[in-house]
Image (cartoon, rainbow, N blue to C red):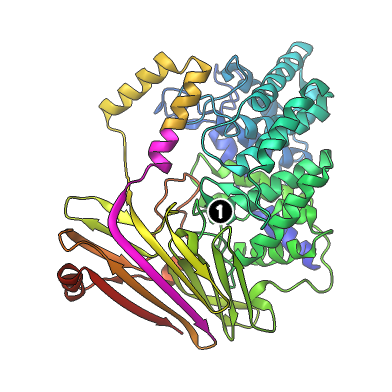
């Protein structure tokens, strides 16, 4: 079996095995008023009061299963599958807002790239697959829906910078222009492209809220690579090339990827763009090949790991990758930790620092308080020693805080074998709805969300409260990291007012802290790392002197 065949089998198995799960979420009864709805909690369990549109994104994976003769694919060219695809597509015409948008999390959300961009991307592929099954009236309704969604994407954006969302707005907008020859949308495409490029850094990363997130950067590579298949664009191709060179540092020796070093703490590796661009950039294939082996080990994020809302995102990622798996050269370029000699890297704009020394590989995000991952190398792979997210704690009044955040006032420096960072601690929020709050929220959205601009600002407020709001706590971490062939030494100096009542303090725990729905999936590496509970003696010293120094050596 060739390398490509083995990798294709990995992709196919991960994606195709979850198609029955998606079909189980879909109302497949042609007599039902919700025929084609893929939100099972709505049409069957009746546990929610509106259908989340993003559930329909599953039709993209179903389209690939229907149109592609993968080995062992029971769904290929099946007439019933064609009818279910048609039903899923037509159901979307009934839940679209007049402005072209769709709702995902709550009524009148009017989401931009998520969900409208993702859904239009799915529509573009499903429409081509089942066009011959649509009546003239149905075809006209679907076409009108798609053009409205494209115009909504082109005329709007969202509060809070997520570069991958801008890439996902460009992808379906470009696809729709080419599919329907809708040249009147070209100015909107160029406007959105110009916005996206402002979020792309010369170092190779793209902005996700307030920093770099490797997981979503790989998604951006995939979205751009798909777009380049239908609309060649040298500027976007260059963004993708630089991103491929940047993501290599987060393809870890233990087959994991990204994680708590990123601004959004995501572990997922989007492989499709790396397969599409691999013939031009073999480094992309080095990353994709290593991660394919990781998927077999349960590392990174695959569809079976994800909750009902999100597993439909990953099915097409793997089926696209299986369909477009690239021919590997006889020898792939080495990843940073596979280099024969010691190396170092420092991206000052991103705050990313690290390198290889002897049998160790380390990478840190200084812009997030010095979060760091350290690996011991063993041939072509390695094992994780620590995944350190700085300090976290809780005050006696219940306020949680952490240093694992992008503090606008942080200070850091990086050199070949050492790095330093000074970081304030910020509060953590963990808010949930109770029946009263949910009633008030839904009433407010029903009363105000019908208006497009109001809905836009309300969503921005929700995002700010859940994801971006933070206040400082008078606790400061000064972290100094030194790195040599015998390992890594981390010296943490923690300062706090002696009057501050700290109940518990953790050092070096693997602790995601940001509200991101696509984060916090279990990873096998979690079983191998642990933090440090500050002892009562040390807590007393911090209280008595206002300062505590903790030095740890990892070897």
Q: Position of residue 113 (x, y in %)?
A: 61, 33
Q: Residue 513 in the image: x percent, y percent?
A: 39, 53
Residue 460's place in the image compared with 34, above or below, is: below
Q: Give the range drawn in magenta.
A: 462-484
Residue placed most toward the observer, 299 or 135:
299
**Up-down: is 266 above or below 455?**
below
Q: Farthest residue in the top direction?
A: 137
Badge 1 density bin: few <14, some 14–19, many ≥20, Cα 10 Å: many
Whole-percent x, y for residue 142 in the image:
71, 19
In this rendered view, identify the residue nearer to me: 65 or 542: 542
- Whether residue 464 appears in magenta in the rendering, the answer is yes
Q: Residue at x 75, y 14 (%)?
A: 140
The N terminus is located in which quarter? bottom right
**Residue for point 55% across, 18% down:** 32
Q: Is residue 225 visible?
A: yes
Q: Which type of secondary structure does the marked residue at label 1 adopt?
A: loop
Q: Nearer the viewer, residue 123 or 207?
A: 207
Query: Where does label 1 land, which residue?
Result: 213
Question: In which quarter of the view is residue 88 placed?
Answer: top right
């Amino acid at each position: 079996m060739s390398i490509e065949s083995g990798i294709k089998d990995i992709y196919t198995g991960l994606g195709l095995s979850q198609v029955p799960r998606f079909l189980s979420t879909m109302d497949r009864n042609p007599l039902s008023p919700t025929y084609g709805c893929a939100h099972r909690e709505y049409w069957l369990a009746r546990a929610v009061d509106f259908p989340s549109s993003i559930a329909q994104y599953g039709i993209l994976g179903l389209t690939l299963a229907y149109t592609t003769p993968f080995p062992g694919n029971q769904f290929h060219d099946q007439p019933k599958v064609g009818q279910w695809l048609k039903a899923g597509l037509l159901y979307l015409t009934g839940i679209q807002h007049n402005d072209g948008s769709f709702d995902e999390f709550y009524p009148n959300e009017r989401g931009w790239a998520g969900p409208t961009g993702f859904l239009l991307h799915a529509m573009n592929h499903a429409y081509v697959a089942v066009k011959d099954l649509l009546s003239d009236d149905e075809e006209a309704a679907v076409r009108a829906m798609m053009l409205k969604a494209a115009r909504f994407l082109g005329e709007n954006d969202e509060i809070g910078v997520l570069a991958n969302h801008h890439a996902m707005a460009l992808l379906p907008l470009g696809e729709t222009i080419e599919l329907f020859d809708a040249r009147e949308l070209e100015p909107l495409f160029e406007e959105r492209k110009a916005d996206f490029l402002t979020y792309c850094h010369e170092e190779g990363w793209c902005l996700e809220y307030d920093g770099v997130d490797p997981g979503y950067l790989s998604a951006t590579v995939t979205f751009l690579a798909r777009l380049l298949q239908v609309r060649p664009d040298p500027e976007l191709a260059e963004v993708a090339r630089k991103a491929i060179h940047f993501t290599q540092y987060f393809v870890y020796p233990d087959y994991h990827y990204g994680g708590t070093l990123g601004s959004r703490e995501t572990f997922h590796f989007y492989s499709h763009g790396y397969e599409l661009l691999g013939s031009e950039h073999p480094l992309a294939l080095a990353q994709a090949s290593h991660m394919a082996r990781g998927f077999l080990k349960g590392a990174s994020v695959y569809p079976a790991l994800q909750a009902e809302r999100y597993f439909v995102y990953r099915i097409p990622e793997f089926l696209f990758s299986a369909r477009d798996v690239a021919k590997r050269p006889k020898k792939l370029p080495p990843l940073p930790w596979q280099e024969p000699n010691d190396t170092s890297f420092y991206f000052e704009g991103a705050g990313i620092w690290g390198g290889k020394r002897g049998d160790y590989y380390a990478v840190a995000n200084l812009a997030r308080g010095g979060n760091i991952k350290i690996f011991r190398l063993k041939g072509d792979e390695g094992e994780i020693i620590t995944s350190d997210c700085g300090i976290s704690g809780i005050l006696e009044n219940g306020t949680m805080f952490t240093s694992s955040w992008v503090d606008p006032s942080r200070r850091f420096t990086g050199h070949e074998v050492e790095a330093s960072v000074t970081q304030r601690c910020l509060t953590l929020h963990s808010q949930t709805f109770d029946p009263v709050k949910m009633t008030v929220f839904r009433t407010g959205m029903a009363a105000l969300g019908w208006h497009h601009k109001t809905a836009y600002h309300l969503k921005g407020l929700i995002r700010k409260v859940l994801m971006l709001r933070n206040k400082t706590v008078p606790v400061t971490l000064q972290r100094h990291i030194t790195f040599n062939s015998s390992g890594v030494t981390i010296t943490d100096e923690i300062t706090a007012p002696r009057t501050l009542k700290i109940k518990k303090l953790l050092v070096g725990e693997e602790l995601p802290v940001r509200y991101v729905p696509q984060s916090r999936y279990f990873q096998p590496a979690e079983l191998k790392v642990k933090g440090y509970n500050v002892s009562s003696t040390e807590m007393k010293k911090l209280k008595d002197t206002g300062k505590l120094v903790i030095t740890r050596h990892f070897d």
